[in-house]
Image: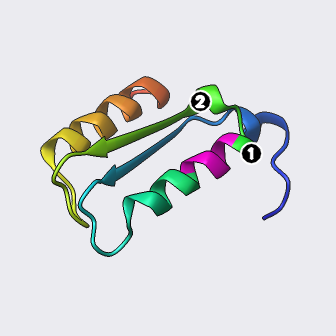
Amino acid sequence: QGPVSGVNKEIPVLQCHGDCDPLVPLMFGSLTVEKLKSMINPANVTFRTYSGMMHSSCIEEMMDVKQFIDKHLPPVD
């Protein structure tokens, strides 16, 4: 809950959520992403939803995570 400042305001964030999650409703994911956008550069916040996904993961989500990592982290030798 502390203030976000400096370089942390530019940190890229990927938030993923299934639209059928019975444990954490999609509405809470939507509220969370809006809070993030108010704290850091909203252009750096990406929110992805996955049709039919419950409180789990899917291949599409894992591909999005891989692309996010490839884009934002340096390669490992």
On the image, the x and y values in percent for residue 13 come to 53, 40
In the displayed image of the protein, which residue is found farthest to the bottom?
23
Q: Which residues are magenta?
A: 33-37
Image side of residue 59 versus residue 23, left or right: left
Residue 69 or 22: which is nearer the viewer?
Answer: 22
Q: Residue at x 32, y 44 (%)?
A: 49
Q: Quadrant of residue 68?
A: top left
Residue 49 or 70: which is nearer the viewer?
Answer: 49
Image side of residue 8 versus residue 5, left or right: left
Label 1: state its secondary structure: helix
Disc assigned to residue 39: 1
Residue 50 or 59: which is nearer the viewer?
Answer: 50
Residue 33 or 13: which is nearer the viewer?
Answer: 33
Disc assigned to residue 27: none
Give the mark, 1 or 2, whose residue is nearer the N terminus.
1
Q: Residue at x 66, y 40 (%)?
A: 37
Mark 1 is surrounded, within 10 Å at the Cα level, by few (under 14), some (14 to 19) or many (20 or more) other residues, namely some
The image shows a total of numbered marks equal to 2
Q: Amino acid at mark 2?
A: Asn
On the image, the x and y values in percent for residue 14 come to 46, 41
Label 2 belongs to which residue? 44
Q: Is residue 54 magenta?
A: no
Label 2: state its secondary structure: helix
Q: Amino acid at mark 1?
A: Met
